Image: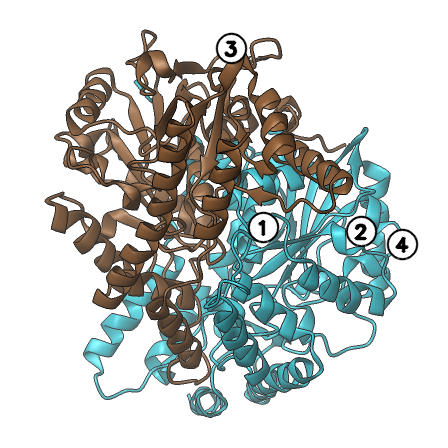
Chain colours: A cyan, B brown
Amino acid sequence: MFKINEDYLKLPGSYLFSTIGKKVAAFQAEHPNTSIIRLGIGDVTRPLAPSIIDALHGAVDEMAHAETFHGYAPDLGYDFLRNAMALNDYVAKGCDINADEIFISDGAKCDSGNIQEIFAKDNRIAVCDPVYPVYVDTNVMAGRTGTYDARTETWSSVIYMPCTKETNFAPELPKEVPDIIYLCFPNNPTGATITKPQLQEWVDYANKNGAVIIYDAAYEAYISEKDVPHTIYECEGARTCAIELRSFSKNAGFTGVRLGAAVVPKDLKCGDVMLHSLWARRHGTKYNGAPYIVQRAGEAVYSDAGRAQLKEQVAYYMKNAGIIYEGLKSAGYSVSGGVNAPYIWLETPKGMTSWEFFDYLLERAGVVGTPGSGFGPSGEGYFRLTAFGSYENTVAAIKRIQEI
Amino acid sequence: MFKINEDYLKLPGSYLFSTIGKKVAAFQAEHPNTSIIRLGIGDVTRPLAPSIIDALHGAVDEMAHAETFHGYAPDLGYDFLRNAMALNDYVAKGCDINADEIFISDGAKCDSGNIQEIFAKDNRIAVCDPVYPVYVDTNVMAGRTGTYDARTETWSSVIYMPCTKETNFAPELPKEVPDIIYLCFPNNPTGATITKPQLQEWVDYANKNGAVIIYDAAYEAYISEKDVPHTIYECEGARTCAIELRSFSKNAGFTGVRLGAAVVPKDLKCGDVMLHSLWARRHGTKYNGAPYIVQRAGEAVYSDAGRAQLKEQVAYYMKNAGIIYEGLKSAGYSVSGGVNAPYIWLETPKGMTSWEFFDYLLERAGVVGTPGSGFGPSGEGYFRLTAFGSYENTVAAIKRIQEI
């Protein structure tokens, strides 16, 4: 008789966005004339940039003729895209990353979920709290997190690194030494960042302790300040301790196009074994490449026209971020994020819980955000708004909040 | 200090296609004037059909405007595609499968690699021999296969079901009862099929013994004979024991477009737990949906125009299959497959090993095929040719083989 992977059953239900959906639907039913503004979800809303659209059409046309048709892609990605990424994301920034260390994928969510597979089951992970849920959940499914304590909402084998106002929303080096450290800067959900010297401390810590850093750089395009690193490979020694995950979702609006990449330097080893080889083996065995037309769209992200158009797109969202940040601040809220990230993280006022503030904002302003407690226990008392709405909606939402 | 997943290291090197590549390159260097014809790889060569191209262009245009832009897809796929599949692939064939039991993915390779994850580590798998390597390799990486015997090229915990001339290239019910049974019909690499009553025996066996069948239906579109089932759900009782994997790669030429689906009926349970819930959880946690434009292309596969065009495309390849089959037969070879599948499986002549015949065919005819031994020990003494080349090349290749 077959048996299931019991570790899957340990996962608590994922109720965050379904609960939000239900509450919003109930409110809308009671208030059919209120136009609800959603600043809750991390999905983009701007259309794809013209140069991306052109690249897609061009690649589709290639698929229409035998001479230019493309079947199976190379397992690890087309050279044209790997070269463009190596050149623009690394070499141009003075980082020593080669094209053959870049693995093209269908997105950073998949990579951040799958990467744990190449590590031993008894490795201990460390995560920020609050955190993007995929890092923890995929380790739960692999049986790596011990037992769940429903009261504290924590796993016995996971090392949590609180990121609150008290830590300036940055994690501190953990006292217990983890084997795998998940870091995401600029951060989802808090919008916080750390400086290059601060990141260097993490790299040094990882190298000293034989830990691997999984560095999620999905929001890199939103960095506006000078001392914030765009990639972990700006730090000395990162080649021996860090895997970096890249996304096209937020810098180019590819949430529905699906493209990402993982960088695994060949110097990152366990004994004689390169993690590069293991990840290549996983790609070759369980994955069949990102679509040709999507990889061509990714290439267009790095063209002159593409870069100019996407700079405008990011600026559009960051203008929204500024409106939210300044608007809330002037209304007396304690706000962070929003400067190097499309996420604004605010303290709930008057001692409200995250969910109480959710209800308050929905009922009083018709605005939907995300309760911070949905991202982990240290998110309690906080709330996330995103800059991915339209300009008009963002302005209207903030006006409503100010008028509560 | 972090440690790696040691199970990855157990995998023997994957040398089949790289060895073929090296041998072909060496031959070409020595014989620069010989035009080599490749009938080895399972990749398609015909361009995408016009209705697919139209759907892709149309969806790309939608992505260019805020009003019709699509961000994150629903985790399990867009309803328009799930409904089209349910209707055309199942309901129209009298099978009881609902749209919400169909999980859209980026291909059958990924699904066939990932599906093992929802099962317990100590489950035993049974595979045909020869076999598509992904089934076994992904179980090796999960630590489910025991130890490897390099002499017999088998894993201690895997139940092998030889498919040779003696068994009419079909597996027999295993004596040891497995927990998970991988079946693929029409088969890669042998091109063999089984009848509906034969498949019913497997379904009955699985239900009786509490086993799950992972049924790979990637080559369903190539079925030409009446008594061959197009889906396992034609068999009574399959809803309680079978997961079916569907591909768009071979019926619609999507090898470089990437689209597939897994069907997990809600009646398939371990105790109270639906495998449907586990697979949904995996999709929701580790996957972010197939691209919108690709799902629209998938929908076009089921349009009237799409169906007509793809019928022609399959007929094109099956004409090649007929040419290979008849041509080899008339040249005295013992041949199978090629009637309900794009693969032709031949016995190597004169007692040659698979690799000896590879060299023989390359040197004497300049034709590249795939040694059967690359698919498992029972593939030794066999050889695979594929119908996915151009008509002209296929005719030329067979003429050359006949003239050896």
Mark closer to the observer (2, 3): 3
Q: Residue at x 77, y 77 (%)?
A: A225
Q: Splitting the image into 4 quarters, where does residue B311 fall?
A: bottom left
Q: Is residue B29 left or right of residue A119?
A: right
Please say if the residues under marks 4 and 3 sit with CB atoms less than 8 Å apart.
Answer: no
Q: Which mark is residue A236?
A: 4
| Residue matched to label 3 | B156
Q: Which mark is residue A202?
A: 2
Amino acid type at mark 3: Ser
Amino acid type at mark 1: Asp
| 2 or 4: tag closer to the N-terminus | 2
What's the distance in space between the residues labelled 2 and 4, CA to CA?
11 Å
Q: Residue at x 19, y 17 (%)?
A: B208
User: Is A93 located above or below residue A373 in the figure?
Assistant: below
User: Is A143 located above or below residue A51 in the figure?
Assistant: above
Q: Residues within 10 Å of mark 2 (few under 14, many from 20)?
A: many
